[in-house]
Image: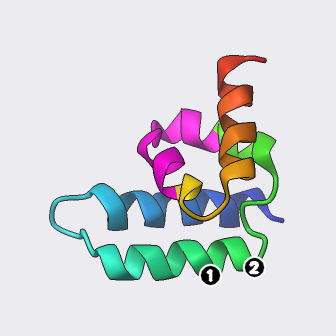
Amino acid sequence: MNKDLIRSGVKILNKLYFHPEKRDEWLAIASTELMLELGLFKNAQIMANLIYSEESYGLLEKIKLFDMKLAHNIEQILKGE
């Protein structure tokens, strides 16, 4: 999957979950489900790099609600294990 698409997905979810003026929990959940179903976030290495560079660590907790294995893999990469 294109890294720019994944970066856009991370930024969108970060805004929908955490930005004070753009927060929309329902849309954030629906978007997370769609992005995971489309396989946008299946590459844990790219996801870890983007979460690190965007400082979007809070997304890990949200991703855990939908895909615990992916979130665990991302956490392991971020820890350097």
Q: Which mark is residue 34?
A: 1
* Disc 1/disc 2 C-alpha distance (Å): 6 Å
| Among the 4 quarters of the image, the one containing residue 18 | bottom left
Drawn side of residue 59 relative to residue 43, left or right: left
Q: Give the range drawn in magenta.
A: 50-62
Question: Would residue 45 appear left or right of 19 to someone viewing this image?
Answer: right
Callout 1 secondary element = helix
Q: Does the magenta stretch include residue 57?
A: yes
Image location (x, y in percent) of residue 33: 59, 77
The secondary structure that dominates the magenta segment is helix
Residue 12 is situated, as x and y percent measured from the top left of the image, at 45, 66
**Of the pair 1 and 28, the residue shown nearer to us:** 28
Q: To which quarter of the image does residue 66 belong?
A: bottom right
Residue carrying label 2: 38
Q: Residue at x 67, y 59 (%)?
A: 67
Q: In this view, does 61 lie above or below 30?
A: above
- Residue occupying image coordinates x 31% and y 73%: 25
Occupied quadrant, residue 46: top right
Is 63 placed left or right of 58 in the picture?
right
**Residue 8 appears at what percent x and percent y?**
57, 64
Q: Can you say whether 34 is above or below 70 in the image?
A: below
User: Residue flagged by tag 1: what amino acid is it?
Assistant: Leu
Which residue is situated farthest in the left direction here? 21
Residue visible at 46% across and 43% down in the picture: 56
